[in-house]
Image: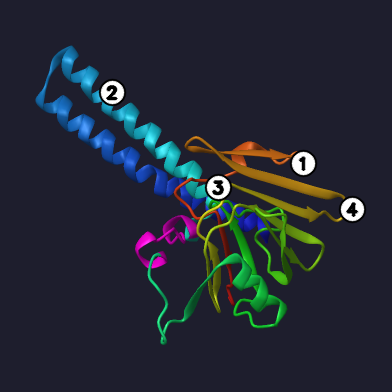
Amino acid sequence: MKTLSNILTTIAAVIIGLIPACGFVIIGFLIYASIKGIEGIAIALLISLVGIFLGFVVFNTARRRGILDFITAVRASPELDNLEPTENSDFRKLTISQYIDKFIKGDRLLKGGQIRIWGDFKSRQLDIFNELESAKQIDVDKLQINFSGERQLTIWNPGTIHESLTYLKILKADRIKWEWQDENGTKNYYDYWIKGNKIKTETNTDWDIYNIDTSTGALPLEIIYNNN
C-alpha cells in the first residue's frame, strides 16, 4: 500500500513539476519566434533551462512532502498568531509555565497529534499520532514534552504557546531535539537548530539529509491533531 502511495505521489509530483517547466518552455518558444537568430536561441534556451530547474524543484518538494501537504500545507500565520484570545476563541495563548501548570492539573486541550519541526514531519515517528504524557521545564531555558512510546521533544528558549483542540504551536525557539525508539529499542535523535537564516541538523541515524524539509519561515513546533 505504501509503495502504491509513493508511486501515485511521484506521478502527481511529475505533473505538478511539469506545469512551470512547460510554461517557461512555451515562453522561450514564443520569444524565439519573435527574435530570430543566435540571440533568440540563447534567450529561449536560457528561459527554458530556468523553467526546467524550477520544475525540478517543485517536483522534488512535492514528492518529498506529499501532494496534499504541498498544496494545503499548514504554514505560520503571523497575523492570526499575534491575535489575543477572547471569550469566544477556540484557542488559548499560554506562557510555558502556564502550559505546564495546566498540563499537570489535567487542563489541556490537545491530547496529541503529528509533529512538525520547522516544517519537517516525514517518518521518524513524527507523522504518527503522538499522545502527550507529560510536560516539564528543565533548567531555565528548556521545555521537555514526553509522549507515549518513549518519545520526547526538548525545546530550547521556547516562546508563547497557542493551544486548541486540534493543534499546539510554539511560536519561537532556538533549538529542538526529537528523540524516539526504533523497533529494535535503539534510542534515536534528530537535533534542529537555527544558524543564521538556515536550519542545521544533527542525528545519530542514517536518515538522508535530502529528506529533511525545514524552513525558517515555518513555526518551530506544531503538534497537529488529524482525525482522518
Q: Point out the stretch of residues depicted in magenta.
A: 69-81
The residue sitting at the bottom extreme is 88
Disc on the earlier residue, 4 or 2: 2
Classed neighbour count for the residue bearing mark 3: other residues with Cα under 10 Å, few (<14), some (14–19), many (≥20): many
Mark-to-mark CA distance, 2 and 3: 27 Å
Which mark identifies residue 46? 2
Q: Could you give the CA–CA distance between mark 4 and mark 1, rounded to whole angstroms?
A: 13 Å
Circle 1: element type = loop
Residue that mark 4 sits on: 184
Mark 3 lies on residue: 64
Q: How far apart are marks 1 and 2 (CA)?
A: 40 Å
Which mark lies nearer to you, 4 or 3? 4
Mark 1 neighbour density, 10 Å: few (under 14) some (14–19) many (20 or more)? few
Mark positioned earlier in the residue sequence (4 or 1): 4
Q: Residue furthest right?
A: 184
Q: Do the residues labelled 4 and 2 touch (CB within 8 Å)?
A: no
Q: How far apart are the alpha carbons under marks 4 and 2?
A: 51 Å
Residue located beneath label 1 in the image: 205
First in sequence: mark 4 or mark 3? 3
**Residue 40: quadrant of the picture:** top left
Which marked residue is nearer to the observer: mark 1 or mark 3?
Answer: 1
Do we see residue 103 in this rendering?
yes
Q: Where is residue 125 in the image (x, y as percent from the top left)?
A: 71, 58
Residue 20 — which label?
A: none
Q: 106 or 203: which is nearer to us?
A: 106
Q: Nearer the viewer, mark 2 or mark 3?
A: 3
What amino acid is labelled 3 in the image?
Arg
Identify the residue at image location x=38%, y=70%.
83
Instruction: Indicate the secondary structure of the residue bearing disc 4.
Output: loop
